[in-house]
Image (cartoon, rainbow, N blue to C red):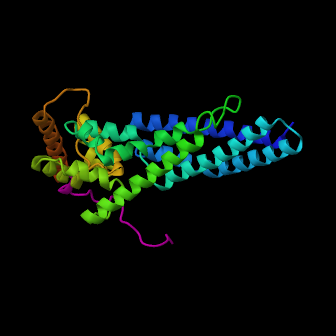
Amino acid sequence: MNEYVDRADRMVREIRERMMDTVREAKRAQDLRMKSNADEVVRGGMDPLIDRSRYTAELYREGAAEAHRAGADRRRVQMLEARAEAMRAYSAVLTAATTGRAPLAASVKRTLRSQYPGMDQEVLNTKAGRLTQAAGLEEAIALTPKDPREWDPDREQALGRARTYIRAVDALHQENRSVCKRTRDRDVQGGALREQVTMRMSPEQKRIQSQWQKNTVADAPGTGTAGGLPPRTREALRSSAAHGHVLGIPPMPPVDPRRELSDSAVMGRQSQMLSQLETRVRGAEHMIPPRPSVRPTVGLDR
């Protein structure tokens, strides 16, 4: 019996369970349009797994050394060594995903499809779009080790896939920095994708986008401003504020991606939602706050 290996196997199962819990929580955040979007939930769940993965790698390394001293089968020792390397690589993958603020590729696709339905595929096929998808958090999640009873890192090419993912995150970051240096955009996050969307926008889209962003605040669904909006516009405000700016996509009023609408119909619907928001914001700005019923006091009551 190898105590190091037993502990490492338990750690792998725990890491797998925590990652699955994170994915479920992200799905819930996505479905409920929570203030913390799915991307942030996934990155937040990955962060504490970095040190756990490093520790698991050390356990497998110690286990391999002990198995070698005990005269274990050579293939068994090599398997344990491969798992140690794979866990170190997995820790590097999680580090790249969290520090590089990688997005969920599904969030990028969904946001583009709902806010810019006429250009979503074109943007995704650009260099920025391909890099964003390659660096997507889904790729890091897919590298989570399998149950120890069936996990073979060499067969699954774990090290090669990990290196490929880390290179993709680095390439996306370099592309964002390069674009923002050229455009003098201080917000590096999502800069390359933002440029590809902006350069394809019509003058009317730019007008709507500028005014929508001006009137959008991240916590708008909880304010009086959003409270009086029509349900569809309120939901659009919630979705746009919570997702577009995080992904680098300029926030726009989102339309139902399941409906086949012409470009003019999409802009008509977006213009309508913008008008509803602007009307409500202007009304809120002119509201006279109620007088306090009790005179406020300063300092401690005596």
Expressed as whole percent of the image width and height from the top left, the position of residue 162 reads 54, 45
Nearest to the observer: residue 212 or residue 91: 91
Nearest to the observer: residue 198 or residue 89: 89
One can see residue 222 in this view: no
Q: Give the quadrant of the N terminus.
A: top right
In this rendering, would 59 be left or right of 207? right
Expressed as whole percent of the image width and height from the top left, the position of residue 206 reads 15, 51
In this rendering, would 279 be left or right of 251? left
- Magenta span of residues: 284-302
Q: Is residue 300 magenta?
A: yes
Q: Is the magenta stretch mostly helix, strand or loop?
A: loop
Q: Is 149 located above or below residue 268 in the figure? A: above
Q: Residue at x 40, y 45 (%)?
A: 35
In this rendering, would 220 be left or right of 82? left
In this rendering, would 72 be left or right of 224? right
**Which of the 4 image quadrants contains residue 22?**
top right
**Which of the 4 image quadrants contains residue 64?**
top right
